[in-house]
């Protein structure tokens, strides 16, 4: 408090009224709870630390599964400094822009991807109070943001003015649109039971039973559809190295490639956090630990499951991918809605 008072006294001693008012406004913003949430917890700092941890965990986890020697012993302190070294390398690595590429879109798409991926996390609550924006329609907000990614991936491939990135962008568009429909439908059961589109209310509705126990089919459809949205194995056709080099991000290098990878791993964290909030009771857990601890622990477990699939499953064919999305998962999502209605009637004592 003495430091705060001293700073206020220094600002008040400034003779120029406009400068004094500006500095008081900035100082007030720095002291606000919203600034703390956006910058530190659960905001930018927490996101960057979590994403770096996911990259490190993926390397170590898959190395243990597949007996890879390099990642198991890379660097001191279990290789925890490797993500930092990668960041420094990408930061100083030259960004090469193809001569015939649309330079404006080529450079702006990675930035938009990072901004949108981070925006989705503003409505995910780590606890009842640790949420940046507690929107009444936060679930719809996340779906609205997710709907923008297929267009951006196609735009990235088109802006590269190269056939392989464009093919990867087309694949990404087909894939993400195919799996967004069952993804949306898989959450309708949750909305029906919680009677809300707000993540905080949805988590509170699971105080007795986690929704994964009441809606196991909906949870299964959600996690499969979300893995396809993330373009991860076995649904990594938009980035299939053996077929189209590196897909829609083939021509990206340096920090633009780093921004794309940051957005992808942020989406992995978002998908895991969203599954935790919808089906695993969010921050609900034994009271001897902070609520945010339980939320982050559950999220980490879900992320490890998503990562583990990369080490054990082969890539599916494009025809199988579309069939799984439009036929099997779509039908299962309808069945999960009917099951949710039955569960709701049972809880109300009608059946």
Image (tube, rainbow, N blue to C red):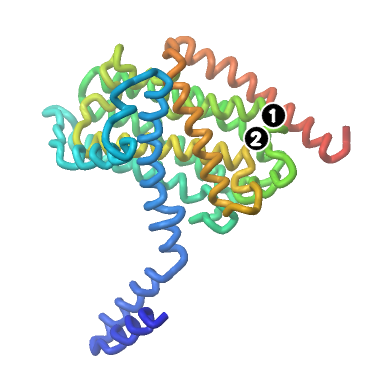
- Residue 273 at x, y = what percent? 52, 41
- Residue at the image position 35 percent from the left and 74 percent from the top: 27
Q: Nearer the viewer, residue 172 or 200?
A: 200
- Residue 192 at x, y = what percent? 70, 39
Q: Is residue 161 left or right of residue 186?
A: left
Q: Tag on residue 302?
A: none
Alpha carbon distance from label 1 to label 2: 7 Å
Q: Mark 1, residues whose alpha carbon is within 10 Å: few (<14), some, or many (≥20)?
A: many
Question: Dot 1 lies on which element?
Answer: helix
Q: Tag on residue 337?
A: 1
Residue 109 at least partly seen: no
The quarter of the picture where the C terminus appears is: top right
The quarter of the picture where the N terminus appears is: bottom left
- Residue at the image position 28 percent from the left and 89 percent from the top: 13
Q: Is residue 193 above or below residue 26?
A: above
Q: Is residue 277 above or below residue 67?
A: below
- Residue at the image position 34 percent from the left and 20 percent from the top: 68
- Residue 310 at x, y = what percent? 43, 21
Residue 205 at least partly seen: yes
Question: Dot 2 lies on which element?
Answer: helix
Q: Is residue 41 above or below residue 312?
A: below
Question: Looking at the rendering, which quadrant does residue 335 occupy?
Answer: top right
- Residue 232 at x, y = what percent? 42, 24
Question: Looking at the rendering, which quadrant does residue 9 occupy?
Answer: bottom left
Question: Looking at the rendering, which quadrant does residue 191 occupy?
Answer: top right
- Residue at the image position 15 percent from the left and 37 percent from the top: 93
What is the residue that sits farthest to the left in this orientation? 99
For the residues labelled 1 and 2, say whether their Cβ atoms are less than 8 Å apart. Answer: yes
Q: Nearer the viewer, residue 212 or 34?
A: 212
In this figure, which residue is indicated by the disc labeled 2? 188
């Amino acid at each position: 408090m003495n430091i705060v008072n001293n700073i206020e006294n220094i600002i008040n001693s400034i003779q120029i009224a406009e400068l004094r008012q500006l500095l008081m406004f900035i100082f007030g913003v720095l002291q606000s709870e919203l600034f703390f949430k956006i910058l530190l917890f659960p905001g930018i700092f927490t996101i960057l630390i979590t994403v770096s941890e996911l990259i490190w965990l993926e390397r170590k986890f898959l190395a243990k599964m597949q007996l890879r020697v390099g990642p198991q012993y890379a660097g001191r302190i279990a290789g925890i400094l490797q993500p930092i070294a990668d960041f420094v390398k990408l930061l100083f690595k030259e960004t090469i822009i193809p001569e015939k590429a649309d330079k404006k879109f080529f450079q702006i798409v990675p930035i938009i991807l990072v901004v949108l991926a981070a925006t989705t996390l503003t409505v995910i609550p780590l606890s009842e109070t640790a949420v940046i924006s507690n929107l009444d329609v936060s679930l719809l907000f996340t779906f609205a943001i997710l709907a923008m990614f297929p267009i951006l991936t196609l735009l990235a491939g088109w802006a590269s003015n190269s056939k392989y990135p464009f093919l990867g962008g087309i694949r990404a568009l087909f894939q993400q649109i195919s799996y967004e429909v069952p993804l949306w439908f898989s959450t309708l059961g949750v909305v029906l039971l919680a009677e809300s589109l707000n993540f905080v209310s949805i988590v509170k509705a699971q105080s007795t039973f986690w929704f994964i126990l009441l809606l196991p089919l909906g949870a299964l459809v959600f996690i499969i559809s979300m893995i396809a949205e993330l373009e991860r194995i076995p649904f990594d056709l938009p980035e299939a190295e053996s077929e189209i080099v590196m897909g829609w991000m083939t021509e990206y290098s340096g920090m633009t490639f780093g921004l794309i990878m940051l957005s992808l791993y942020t989406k992995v964290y978002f998908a895991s956090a969203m599954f935790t909030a919808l089906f695993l009771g969010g921050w609900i857990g034994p009271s001897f630990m902070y609520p945010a601890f339980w939320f982050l622990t559950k999220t980490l477990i879900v992320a490890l499951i998503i990562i583990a699939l990369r080490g054990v499953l082969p890539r599916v064919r494009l025809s199988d991918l579309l069939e799984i999305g439009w036929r099997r998962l779509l039908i299962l999502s309808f069945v999960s809605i009917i099951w949710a209605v039955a569960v709701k009637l049972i809880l109300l004592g009608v059946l």
